[in-house]
Image: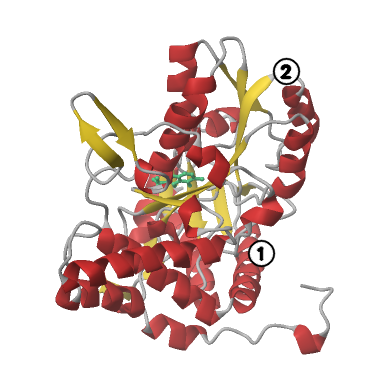
Amino acid sequence: MSDRSPSTLPVPLAVDRVREEFPILAREKYGKPLRYLDNAASTQKPQAVLDAIEHLYAHSYANIHRGVHFLSEEATAAYEAARGRVARFLGAHSPAEVVFTRNATESINLVAASFLRPRAQPGRTIVLTQMEHHANIVPWQLLAEEQGLRVRPVAVTAEGEVDREDFRVALAEDPALVALCHVSNTLGTINPVEEMVAEAKEHGLPVLLDGAQAVAHFPVDVGSLGCDFYVFSGHKVFGPTGIGVLWGREELLAAMPPYQGGGDMIERVSFAGTTFAPPPARFEAGTPHIAGAVGLAAALDYTEALGHGPIEAHEQALLAKGTEVLRSVDGLRIIGEARRKVAVLSFVIEGVHPHDLATVLDRDGIAVRAGHHCTQPLMEYYGLNATTRASFAFYNTFEEVEALGESLGRALRILR
Ligand code: PLP
């Protein structure tokens, strides 16, 4: 932010007003206000998203695509408009590049099954990093086992950045595909994916980016990222659960076989043989999560209206304040000190179990997560079983950061 002149600084976010738009944030527990610091696991939903879902079910709901009646037409229009909204959010060439799935996990499984399986050659590698979420490890392991490939994790530095030299070495080992997280859910690291994709492209490699932890924090432009596939989940970007996105280059999707079979993904079915619909319908077998797509579109509208500049500025200020508060806690070590981070703070405290800590914080109304955060290989690298993780969204406040610091102090007096 420091290189911006005052006249281009974003207008500060009116956080108090924003919080009023999230009904759940008004909750209290144990006589304390809820302080929700578990946003990397899932984000809360603004009234605008709840209203969009209710409006669909109350006014325009029917099954989509096959109906000739007006309700089906309205529901179809809403679902396809949501696809267009996601395409615009990602800077896609066309809505046809946007496939709705259940979540980021399903999107990765789809690419593993439909893109890589048909072109898998035994002996080749799938390049990942040591900081991947299990969702970006296990689908590749399953395929590797089946097809005789090898998963090749790229090392991470002590600060929590990808070891770029090891990445270069891995790229020279004849990989079949590169799959990288845009942002680490445990460390908060923002990976320099533009540069890393460009390096992979020098080797002519296909690249999937796991954007599950990126999209809540900053806008994404798949064109400038240069990747081939980008995945994320609706529930991590203030939208509903059960809806996810796979963006893929049109020509790649067009060449991929179906992932699942069923209704809606066909052109013509006969017992002599079936032909398939073009993408994205080819990859959306069965009745999709219509209301989920509509809610996701409303969430993207909502964050765009708040402004990505103000969101980023506020979250970076929360990160700076949170880092300062945690550093003042006796015996606390932050896990993940990358140069570019989103507001995710994982930490361990000498002599205190992360689960005990999270339990005491919960009694103060503070919701954090303790565990391996579905990144066991990363935990292994740091020699840990678990961390406590506070993860922030734009609706969090400086007062909540201070409350976290105070509650940690109290917890240490109880637990040590
Ligand atoms: N990738 C990353 C980096 C994540 O943090 C997560 C969830 O925490 C996922 C993938 C999987 O997301 P989902 O469970 O919504 O499929």
Picture coordinates of residue 99, whole percent (x, y): 42, 50
| SS type, badge 2 | loop
The amino acid pointed to by label 2 is Glu
Label 1 lies in ligand 1 vicinity (Cβ under 8 Å):
no
- Residue 349, can we see it? no
From the image, which quarter does the N terminus lie in? bottom right
> On the rendered structure, is 181 left or right of 288?
right
State the residue position of label 2: 173
Along the viewing direction, whichever of 199 and 118 lies nearer the viewer: 118
Q: Nearer the viewer, residue 72 or 210?
A: 72
| Residue 65 versus residue 53 in the image, above or below | above
Q: Is residue 283 left or right of residue 178?
A: left
Relative to 291, is 284 above or below? above
Q: Is residue 67 visible?
A: yes
Please name the residue that numbered disc 1 is placed on: 324
Q: Is residue 373 left or right of residue 199?
A: left
Residue 337 x, y percent position in the rendering: 69, 49
Vertical placement of residue 295 versus 190, above or below: below
User: Which of the two labelled residues, at mark 1 and mark 2, occupies the earlier sequence position?
Assistant: 2
Type of amino acid at the residue the image marks with label 1:
Glu
Q: Reply above or below: 1 against 414.
A: below
Q: Residues within 10 Å of mark 2 (few under 14, many from 20)?
A: few
Q: Residue at x 76, y 27 (%)?
A: 166
Q: Position of residue 231 (x, y in %)?
A: 50, 47
Residue visible at 77% across and 45% down? 195
**Nearest-to-viewer mark from 1 and 2:** 2
Please state which of residues 396 and 220 is positioned toward the viewer in this rendering: 220
Gap between marks 1 and 2 measured at Cα: 41 Å
Residue at the image point whose x is 65% and y is 58% from the top: 327
Q: Disc 1, disc 2: CB below 8 Å?
A: no
Q: How many numbered dots are placed on residues in this image?
A: 2
Q: Secondary structure at mark 1?
A: helix
